[in-house]
Image: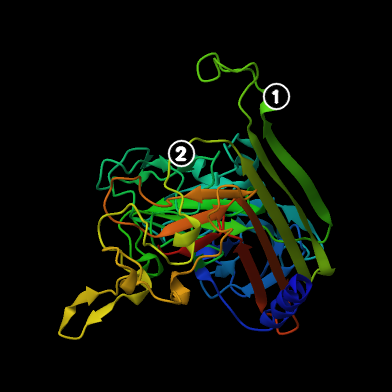
């Protein structure tokens, strides 16, 4: 089944490449003017923008003012070649185009034959007069080389100007560092306030698409660190595509393949075998408390058709194991099948799956009591308990290997019985792929996909 899904994803990737899809929020641009030695405009010049990694080039022609522009340029390293009648061919040194960044390149030609090539040494101006935004690009080298706890890139957000690690959200229990809705134990997720706005007023993009969790100011699916080409933290935006928040935009761009094949494999390990005993928390032990954390994965990218079509794929797995103490009221065998006759709870228990609007008052919700809920009279017990009130016996059994009970039943003496939720031992698998290329129609297409298996697959049962 998994092989079938992987094959279907690859075929879908190839089909989508034939479509014209433009994600302007994850691309950049290049513009400038072409002039002669006296500073006069050179109209009709042919300007070629060449990607250094893939050798894919895009052409443009200067207008009567000598102006040219390239839009929807994928982030990467490029150089320009300029040809004009009566002038030598000019070539700029390589320069980087960042996400949502317009790079100006003004070139002065020299008189000569077209067959002669002159390398332009002067760098273009890096001011961006076309945008009023404030932003900082974090390159791939910084993402991969700087130490990150749990390999989470959000820890680099606090290094950008305008981002402060303070709590501006409501509620004293909300902090700028927590596990987050998609976080994992053993890692650190940073949710700073950008340009003085609330922590929750931050929007995440990946490859031009919104990747923001609805429950908090964090991503929906965590990007793999080795997949990130670069990301940009920007604010004070004047562009309509970034509406919806008053704070900052975190724009992540994933890597793409090139003409050369490259790959990597890694594993990061934290283990109590490498740790010393804590003299305080481990005072009664001869060795450190058991602790296991493994992050492993790999990447591979290259060409499908040279100078035309490229791919890049990656996966990352995570395993975590750490003993922890907790006190909870474990449901009995009778309660697991819906029989609450001998339940120590004093209040009546209701079936949350029966929640519905009150026909007499649409603004109220009503629920049905469990058949065997208090008061404990045998006549109130159903001969066959409701199927929705039955939980699999092994779901919340404390003796089940690899199961972590969480938020089971409230301690004895407290009123009410909440939903029970049990999850497996924390683990996750994240994979991503990206296909890009240039085809006979002259259009550039790219397709990226990322998927994550939940950190804690929940099995919910009501009691």
Residues at discs 2 and 1 in contact (Cβ within 8 Å): no
- Looking at the image, residue 454 sits to the left or right of residue 345; the answer is right
Chosen colour scheme = rainbow
Tell me residue 423's x, y (percent): 54, 54
Residue named by callout 2: 326
Helix, strand or loop status at disc 2: loop
Which mark identifies residue 274? 1
Quarter assignment of residue 59: bottom right
In this rendered view, identify the residue nearer to me: 428 or 325: 325
Q: Nearer the viewer, mark 2 or mark 1?
A: 2
Residue that protrudes farthest toward the left in the picture: 361
In this rendered view, identify the residue nearer to me: 307 or 121: 307
In this rendered view, identify the residue nearer to me: 149 or 39: 149
Q: Is residue 212 above or below residue 170?
A: below
Q: Earlier in the sequence, mark 2 or mark 1?
A: 1
Tell me residue 260's x, y (percent): 84, 57
- Image quarter of the C terminus: bottom left
Quarter assignment of residue 430: bottom right
In this rendered view, identify the residue nearer to me: 392 or 457: 392
- Image quarter of the N terminus: bottom right
For the image, the number of numbered tags is 2
Q: Is residue 252 above or below residue 290?
A: below
Residue 137 appears in the picture as rendered: yes
Tell me residue 23's x, y (percent): 54, 71
Quarter assignment of residue 74: bottom right
Residue located 32% across and 46% down the image: 195
Residue 83 appears in the picture as rendered: no
- The span from disc 2 to disc 1 (Cα, nearest Å) is 26 Å
Helix, strand or loop status at disc 1: helix
């Amino acid at each position: 089944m998994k092989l079938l899904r992987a094959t279907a994803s690859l075929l879908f990737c190839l089909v989508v490449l034939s479509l014209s899809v433009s994600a302007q929020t994850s691309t950049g641009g290049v513009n400038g003017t072409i002039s002669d030695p006296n500073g006069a405009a050179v109209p009709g010049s042919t300007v070629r923008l060449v990607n250094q990694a893939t050798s894919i080039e895009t052409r443009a022609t200067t207008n009567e003012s000598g102006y040219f522009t390239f839009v929807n340029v994928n982030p990467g390293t490029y150089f320009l070649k300029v040809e004009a009648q009566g002038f030598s061919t000019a070539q700029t040194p390589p320069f980087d185009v960042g996400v949502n960044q317009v790079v100006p390149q003004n070139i002065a030609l020299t008189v000569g034959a077209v067959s002669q090539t002159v390398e332009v040494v002067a760098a273009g101006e890096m001011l961006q007069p076309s945008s009023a935004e404030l932003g900082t690009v974090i390159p791939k080298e910084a993402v991969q080389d700087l130490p990150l706890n749990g390999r989470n890139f959000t820890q680099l957000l606090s290094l950008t100007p305008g981002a402060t690690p303070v709590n501006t959200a409501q509620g004293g229990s909300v902090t700028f560092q927590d596990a987050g809705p998609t976080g994992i134990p053993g890692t650190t997720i940073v949710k700073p306030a950008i340009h003085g706005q609330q922590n929750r007023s931050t929007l995440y993009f990946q490859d031009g698409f919104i990747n923001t969790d609805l429950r908090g100011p964090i991503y929906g699916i965590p990007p793999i660190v080795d997949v990130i080409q670069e990301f940009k933290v920007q604010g004070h935006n004047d562009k309509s595509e970034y509406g919806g928040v008053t704070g900052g935009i975190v724009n992540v761009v994933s890597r793409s393949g090139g003409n050369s094949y490259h790959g990597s494999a890694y594993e990061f390990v934290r283990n109590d075998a490498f740790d010393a005993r804590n003299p305080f928390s481990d005072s009664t032990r001869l060795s450190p408390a058991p602790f296991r954390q493994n992050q492993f994965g790999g990447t591979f990218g290259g060409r499908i058709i040279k100078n035309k079509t490229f791919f890049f794929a990656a996966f990352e797995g995570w395993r975590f194991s750490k003993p922890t103490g907790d006190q909870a009221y474990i449901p009995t065998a009778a309660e697991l099948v819906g029989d609450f006759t001998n339940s120590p709870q004093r209040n009546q228990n209701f079936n949350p799956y029966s929640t519905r609007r009150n026909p007499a008052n649409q603004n109220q919700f009503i629920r049905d009591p469990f058949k065997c809920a208090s008061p404990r009279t045998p006549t109130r017990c159903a001969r066959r308990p409701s199927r929705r009130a039955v939980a699999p016996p092994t779901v919340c059994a404390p003796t089940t290997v690899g199961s972590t009970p969480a938020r089971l039943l409230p301690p004895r003496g407290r009123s009410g019985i909440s939903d029970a939720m049990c999850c497996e031992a924390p683990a996750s698998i994240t994979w991503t792929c990206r296909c890009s290329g240039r085809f006979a129609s002259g259009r550039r297409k790219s397709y990226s996909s990322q998927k994550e298996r939940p950190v804690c697959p929940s099995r919910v049962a009501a009691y």
